[in-house]
Amino acid sequence: MIGLVVVSHSRKLAEGVAELAGQMAPSVRIVPSGGDGTGGLGTDYVAVGEAIARADSGSGVVVLFDLGSAKMVADMAAEEAEGSVVVVDAPLVEGAVAAAVRAQGGAGLAEVAAAASGVAPTSVVDGDVVRAEVELTNSVGLHARPAALVARALDRLDASVHVRFGDESADAKSVLALMGLGAPGGARVEVVASGADAAEAVRRVEELAARRFDE
Amino acid sequence: MACTAESVAEAVRAVAAVVVEHREELIRLDREIGDGDHGENLARGFTALVSKLDEVPSSPGGVLRLAATTLISTVGGAAGPLYGTAFLRAATSVGDVATLDGAAVAAALRAALDGVVARGKASLGDKTMVDALTPAVAAAESVAAGGGGVAEVLTAAADAAEMGADSTVPMVARKGRASYLGERSSGHLDPGARSTALLLRTLAASAR
């Protein structure tokens, strides 16, 4: 089950948000991390890292924060964390409750993060990123139809998937973004996936490429 | 004078002394447009760093890396992640070489700026430390390209950083706690830009 961490400048605020969200989600690990560690207002990088470790039961953690520097501290702690961690920019109270309810229902990392913010996660740091280099063996490359095949194949997967071509990177679940890469036939692209279904996502793209996108 | 691990450590000790000396000034600046913790946070972090420098790492990069990890975990606020990231990127930039020259210092400053921008997402004109660090890097690179040594590079960076910090006075904050004040943030020196200029001035003085 996905865990939650609530990062706030105020210890009381973090604990209050965790209490409120926990009422709706008794099985979810919701760990508050508030204050500067010495009783004052602020955020504590080490404490946030420990909170992430406590919240993680192996499936991943969604981190919510209150103000500016709390996001930076959360981002740094997430980068150092062992498992899959998503830091979301969301309204703290409503986001925590929405994420907790979704996690209680057994949803995956991306889904819980999306529930918190209503939009895509701001940053995904994943302990298990899966990458593969894929050659576009068809003649038109990632043009409209092949791009649509890729996006459709990945749509339902619990994974954040990007395709990189040169210096550009595109969301592999977006047909327009994939076409925008302008990757021609014969080009080599890199597929980078993170999340619970990362390996399956990369496998599907490789399979489509091997079939020359049914051209 | 060669810029070794010991001279970088000595420069960091000097920065700590200057930060403690300017603690009240930074607190006052931050009270005007922020949460008032900048001076306290930096003084605590650099004091912690000095105590760790009883045993000096073997390379300049090692000293910078120790500074990064110590500042990240002890400074708090926005300054901890930002200065921590700056020192970490600088450490990575200089690598494991035994001594630094002007070009290496300029490259390290560039890496530090890139790290701060990536972490804090601030742009030039947002009334943040980026407004001090950006002109400092440009000046440092220009002097380094002309063959300047470490002291010349850092002096140019400090001069530019002070002008850059002063330029934040009329700005309206678009990042950080001061951004909540909107127009009322204008007319105040940004504490982060001020501490950046102080830090670079101290490094420059220490290199002489």
Image (tube, coloured by chain):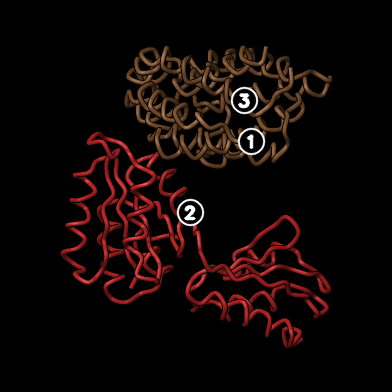
- Callout in the foreground (3, 1): 1
Chain A painted colour = red
Q: Quadrant of the C terminus of chain B?
A: top right
- Callout in the foreground (3, 2): 3
Q: Quadrant of the N terminus of chain B?
A: top right
Q: Are tags 3 and 2 found on a single chain?
A: no
Q: Is residue A174 in view from this perspective?
A: no
Amino acid type of disc 3? Val
The disc numbered 2 marks a residue on which chain?
A
Q: Secondary structure at mark 3?
A: helix
Amino acid type of disc 1? Ser
Disc 3 packing (10 Å; few <14; some 14–19; many ≥20): many
Discs 3, 1 touching: Cβ within 8 Å: no
Q: Which chain is brown?
A: B
* Residue denoted by label 2: A80
Q: Is residue A194 in view from this perspective?
A: yes
Q: Which mark is residue B8?
A: 3
Q: Residue at x 45, y 54 (%)?
A: A78
> Viewer-proximal residue, B43 or A109?
B43
Q: Residue at x 42, y 30 (%)?
A: B48
- Callout in the foreground (1, 2): 1
Q: Residue at x 72, y 83 (%)?
A: A213
The disc numbered 3 marks a residue on which chain?
B
Q: Secondary structure at mark 1?
A: loop
Amino acid type of disc 2? Glu
Q: Which mark is residue B58?
A: 1
